[in-house]
Amino acid sequence: MRDFLPADLRRREYVVRVIKETYERYGFEPLETPAVENIETLLGKYGEEGNQLIFKILKRGEHEKTGEADLALRYDLTVPLARVVAEYGERLPKFFKRYQIQPVWRADRPARGRFREFYQCDVDVVGTRSAVVEAELCAAASDALTALGFRDFTIRLNHRQVLAGVLEAAGVPVDKHADALVALDKMDKIGFAEVLNELSRRGVAHPARTKFMGLFEGMAELEHAAEFVAGDGGLNEVSQTEAYNHAALGRLVEFVGGNEAGARGVDELRRVYEYTHEYGIAGRVRIDPSLARGLSYYTGAILEINVPDLAGSLGGGGRYDNLVGMFSGKDIPACGFSLGLERIIVVMTEREMFPKDLGRAAADVLVTIWNEESVRDSLAFAAELRREAPALRVDVYPEADKLGKQFKYASARGVPYVVVIGDDERARGEVALKDLKTGEQETVARAHAAAILSERLHGNKS
């Protein structure tokens, strides 16, 4: 958990603004929920490892000594959304499209881009099973990242029913499916060999785990084949990705064979991928059977966005058709995606992707105070500037200090203009404007100062 200084907040506000504007272009509406939920609302929704990361709040008052928890800080924004839909369903549209940008808390071990308190930027659609939703979420997240300046990200795509079909086809018992997915979800972090060891430790028998992991060896071979063809001059990067994806889908069909759930999952995966072509983002999409995503509430397509040189993802999500029903008792499908604000900011900062003017001064003009007798006049003039030129950001030095110290203060904060109203200027109805960049100072009519400053600083936007 961190403090955020002004420069940090400017970067965060910039990223949030771009993401909000993108989501709203797709017709999503804002939602906010409390930081605290009843603990029963959260427990049992995130799987074995997720439950361990929930920040629990102990009972208070006379119940404090029990050491029991009845509340918890929210772990994500998806479960609170499901609760809201169950509670306010009749007041919401048939297809509820919402975005939510708020902090969440996890009792995790901090690392680069991973914090115990962090913001999520969620976008979800509730009320339909159409694969159009998954494609739209991919497009909205892609547009947001592109608007922020990202060019090298990949949208990884898989399906929980495909994973279930693969596990069954490999001979992994149903009671070991959850263990296998927890192990597979660590592939990016620990590698192929360690996932095999993890499967063994979790009790997945040798023949089953060997066949299961054989699928991913086969996918690597498809990758090398596509790279070879591309390197031979036959394919550009987008065509190479498309060739690999079609080959990967074919390999999945072959592997799951007659498994009904697995085959249905592959068909849905194919449909989502086809729809991404219409949004013009298919070249960024990669079918990845190793993508598992650890949260247990996913039921269908799952997706994740990655960039090179970042351990972990910039965001992820998927379909969770059963989660709302846990609260409402009704069958309400849903699908969503979350961008990780903190990791986006980490990468953008390291790559120097932020606009240069984000580091601008806190104010455009500093109004000085000549002496104790002129305090009220300086305050009045600052009010005049703000009223006559709303685009100007006007600060007032709070003490009657030496002018040199007031100039030094303005310079240290990067303020470009300083206003001086001495006794002579006041008597003539004038003010002195000092440009701290050039060192030049001029005297102008007080009545014209707002227009002059506005023109020089903002091109007369007042």
Image (cartoon, rainbow, N blue to C red):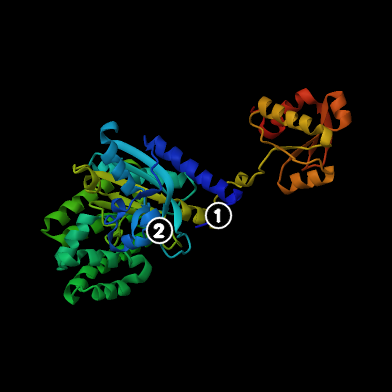
Helix, strand or loop at mark 1: loop
Query: Residue 167's spot in the image, x, y percent?
Result: 18, 64
Query: Residue 55's spot in the image, x, y percent?
Result: 39, 58
Residue toward you, 45 or 123: 45
Query: Residue, x 17% and y 75% (percent of image)?
Result: 207
Position of 348 compared to 215: left or right? right
Q: Amino acid at mark 2?
A: Arg
Q: Residues within 10 Å of mark 2 (few under 14, many from 20)?
A: many
Q: Is residue 176 at least partly visible in the picture?
A: yes
Position of 453 compared to 357: left or right? right
- Whether the residues at callouts 1 and 2 have beta carbons within 8 Å, the answer is no
Q: Quadrant of residue 257?
A: bottom left
Helix, strand or loop at mark 2: loop
Q: Is residue 67 at least partly visible in the picture?
A: no
Query: Residue, x 50% and y 53% (percent of image)?
Result: 345
Q: Amino acid at mark 1?
A: Asp
Residue toward you, 63 or 270: 63
Q: CA distance from mark 1 to mark 2?
A: 17 Å
Above or below residue 197? Residue 100 is above
**Residue, disc 1:** 3
